[in-house]
Amino acid sequence: MVIVTTSHNPSKYQVDRASALAKDLKIPYVNRKDLKSTDLEQFEYYYVVEKGRITVKLRNTTLFFHPSTAKVRMRNIKNGFKDYLIEALKLNGKELILDTTFGLGSEAILMAAFLSEGKVIGTEASTPIYVVVSHGLKEYRAKEEWVNNAIRKIEVYNDNFRSFIFRQESESFDIVYCDPMFENPVYKSSSMNPLRPFALYETLNEEDIDQMLRVARKKLVLKAHGKDSLFDRIKPDIVMGSRKSGVLYGVIFKQ
């Protein structure tokens, strides 16, 4: 069972918002005063409408929106370090990009920061991740104006990438990006760990690749760990990445 509640001592706005969220998701809203800590352990997971954000909790795990990884990567780029995702994309700033595995949105924010006129469309199949991130994108205000500008160029939908792509016309995006969950997770990646219990783990197949290439005008960019089997099964035209982190980006150009 999944519920929506609020943080302790909520404002009327929080209560109203939690009730509306529960109605949208067609799940129960429970007043926080009626919940004991032992009650919370019985739920599959639960949404908490806090002051200024929505989180999802599962036992000792809390999932919340924050573009911390995007900020770190942009700082590294500005300090002269190479970012292999940006290298793989080779953006001119006007692209329409489909991010098929949106997750917490850090890479979408980084991509959008390099789009002067373009846009990032994201799909996220996991409802709890989508709820946290979609609300976060609407409400988060960063000190760094580039983050706020990037967020304004992003749209995300609660949809499985397969069904979403199936409905799209051929060559409707310039670039398609896919970052499936690694077969060999990097557990020291603290930003990813809260996401893992809520993520959907799907293995890409050749039909997926064909469909992604169908809707791409220029190329498909895939992300994988060096120990994963993805680039053994699907051969990109170019592979680039960091030996230290083991994170690789494969590019398949549209023929």
Image: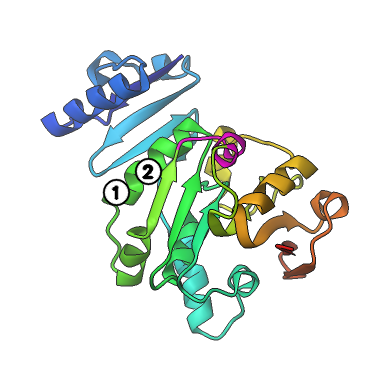
The image shows residue 212 at horizontal and vertical percentages of 66, 49
| Quadrant hosting residue 225 | bottom right
State which quarter of the image contains the C terminus: bottom right
**Residue furthest out toward the right:** 232
Q: CA distance from mark 2 to mark 1?
A: 7 Å
**Residue found at x 42% / y 66%:** 118
**Residue found at x 73% / y 47%:** 210
In reply to whether residue 160 is colored magenta, the answer given is yes
Discs 2, 1 touching: Cβ within 8 Å: yes
Judging depth in this view, the residue of 114 and 137 nearest the camera is 114
Query: Would residue 136 be found to the left or right of residue 99 on screen?
Result: left
The image shows residue 137 at horizontal and vertical percentages of 34, 50
Query: Would residue 173 be found to the left or right of residue 13 on screen?
Result: right
Determine the secondary structure under disc 2. Answer: helix
Above or below for 232 versus 198: below
Q: Which residues are magenta?
A: 158-166
Above or below for 80 versus 155: below
Label 1 amino acid?
Answer: Lys
Say which residue label 1 marks: 138
The image shows residue 8 at horizontal and vertical percentages of 24, 29
Say which residue label 2 marks: 134
In reply to whether residue 104 is colored magenta, the answer given is no
Above or below for 89 versus 25: below
